[in-house]
Each structure stands twice: as C-alpha cells, then as structure tokens.
Amino acid sequence: MKNKIIEVLKENKNEYISGEVISEMLNVSRTSIWKYISKLREEGYIIESASRKGYRLVSSPDILDIDKIKKSLTTKYIGRDIYYYNSIDSTNKKAKNLAMNENKESVIISEEQTMGKGRLGRNWISPKYKGIWMSIILKPEIAPEEAPKITQIAAAAVSKVLDDINIENKIKWPNDIVINKKKVCGILTEMNGEIDKINFIVIGIGINVNLEEKDLSPDIKDIATSLKIESKIFIDRANLVKNILNEFEYLYEDFLNSKSMGKSLEICRRKSALLGKTVRLINVNETKKVKAVDIDSEGRLIIEDEFGKIKRIISGEISIRGLNDYV
C-alpha cells in the first residue's frame, strides 16, 4: 500500500492531493492513508500536508533500484540473485543464515544495518539510504586456507571501481579502503567449512557513500570518512553497486581459473597504503613497529622488524595501524 501511495503522490508531484481522493483511489480509509503517510515519512520521504489541500511529495530518499542494478550487470552469476531489505540487523548474519540452503551465489543488500559488524567484532555505523551495506555468498571449490584471499580480491575490486570514477583511494591491507588516511570501506570475510572443504564464504562490504559529517559519531570522525565528504559530490549508489559486482566477479573468476591472485595483487600492491612505511603491528598481547615490505603471491603481508628479520603474516587477530594516524 505504501508503494501505491507513493505512486499517487509522484503522479501529482508539485501539487497537493487530498487524503479523501487518495483513499477513494486506493479503496482504503483516510485514517489508513494518514498512517501510511506517517510510515513513509519515517522512511525518509518528505511529504508536506496542508489543511483542506492534502498531501504533497517534496522529495524521496535515495532508494536502491534493484531491478536497475540487475539489468545493468555484465556478470554471469554474481548479483543475478539479490535479497533486498529496507532494514536489517546485519547483511553478513542474514547471508550466513541463508547460505546453507543456497545452491548458488547470492547477494544480500540492505538500505540500513542496525547491528553492522567489522573485523574483530567492531561496530560499523550503517545509516539508511547513505551507504552500501551488502554481503555476497560464495561457494568456491578451494581449500579453506585460501579463503582469506577473497578479502583482498574484494578490496581490489572496490579500489578499482573508485579509481574509475576518479576518487583517489588506497588499500590498507587486508580489508580497508582509505581516503586521505581515513577509512571509507571495510570488508569482512567469514567462512563455514570443514578441515578440507568450504561450505560457503560470506564477504561483507560496507561503504560510507553519501554520509555527511553529522552522520559520523565523534569517536570515529578522526578515522572515518565517506565518498561524498571527500569528493564533494553525491554518488549514485546503484551504479556503484553494479560496478563493484561486475569488477568483483571478473577478479574472482580470474582467481578461480588461474589459481592465482595475480590481477588482484597487482592492484593491492599498487594501491597499498602500507608498503614502504613503518607501521604498528598489533597482536593480542603486544604492539611493535615494523616495516611493511611487500605482499607475497599468497596475499600475506611481508614485514621487517627492527632487527631486520623478515616475516610473513596473514590477517586474523593481527591489525595494522599507522604510527600516528589510522594509516
């Protein structure tokens, strides 16, 4: 019913239409119309009301058009099956619940997350209509130890897409996209499997797209930003989703077919925010300064400690931070 009311208001845009007329058109009571109008306002629609005139639609929220996304995809399978939600606790949580009964790759996307999560259990702010909050269910026939590579493939895909729209960015190994030393995108990869078999992988991608300064809480303003804040322009979220899914499938397919991260690693190395820098390596019980030297063919970060000892590390309980900033 809400969609029908919006259609009526859009058809009469810039003009008032009375609640009585709407109720007659849709065969519901005027009280019901008022209740639906209230719900639409809660969802971000700006609807004016005036005595003896009725209602007028002033503006609509930037709602993702899933049909538009699907029609513009060039993928073979990624994004062909999309579960769309107006609000959800966590797209990764929903994806994991769906994944055991899914026989194909699917995408879960929501306008809002109420309990979004990042790496190591951190919270992720996900306001409605302002970001990309999505998870991709994958069922690759690869060894479980290969699963972390998917994170860097996703990071490479997002970075490449941002480059293509002239938004300069860097990749903070293994799972963050940063702009001007602030985080704009986080990637969370979760796996369900056995000793020698992967049942499924869920790759969650959260991007701060059109958030304003006021949307960032005081405790994260120094380390987080959005595409709109940095570029000073409004970003088409649907187009961004489409391009990310297209690029991700291209790099993911290359990985599966070649058994190599070659194309993704080329992007990750070239766009790295860490390589050549002295950074903080944060483990459960200690923090130490190391130099980020390279990323090897398996996606592991090669570091050199203060004694010149070389070590390769994988993501997990280890975090990397800049000496003075996030990067």
Image: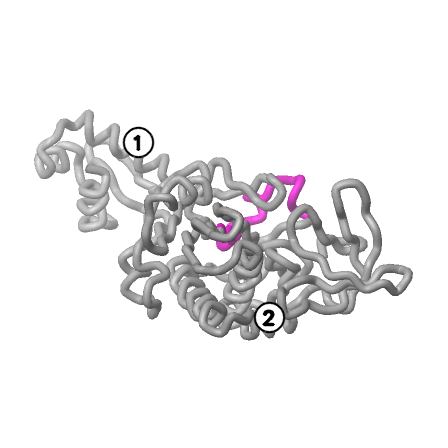
Q: Where is residue 214 in the image (x, y as percent from the top left)?
A: 57, 44
The residue singled out by tag 2 in the image is: 265
| Magenta-span inclusion, residue 216 | yes
Q: Between residues 42 and 138, which one lies in front from this camera angle?
A: 138
The residue singled out by tag 1 in the image is: 38
Q: Can you say which quadrant of the picture contains the N terminus?
A: top left
Label 2 neighbourhood size at 10 Å, few (<14), some (14-19), many (20+)?
many
Answer above or below: position of 286 versus 320. Answer: above
First in sequence: mark 2 vs mark 1: 1
Q: Between residues 183 and 283, which one lies in front from this camera angle?
A: 283
Q: Visible in this render: residue 235?
A: yes
Residue at the (72%, 69%) spot, across then down: 294
Q: Between residues 288 and 213, which one lies in front from this camera angle?
A: 288
- Name the amino acid type tagged 1: Ser
Q: Between residues 270 and 185, which one lies in front from this camera angle?
A: 270
Work out how far the residue at label 2 is from the one at label 1, CA to CA, in angstroms: 50 Å
Q: In this view, does 293 lie to the left or right of 50?
A: right
Secondary structure at badge 2 equals helix
Answer above or below: position of 83 versus 271. Answer: above
- Name the amino acid type tagged 2: Leu
Q: For residue 6, which quarter of the picture?
A: top left
Q: Visible in this render: residue 165?
A: no
Q: Can you say which quadrant of the picture contains the C terminus?
A: bottom right
Which residues make up the magenta segment? 204-222
Answer above or below: position of 283 versus 19. Answer: below
Q: Where is residue 230 in the image (x, y as percent from the top left)?
A: 59, 60
| Magenta-span inclusion, residue 62 | no
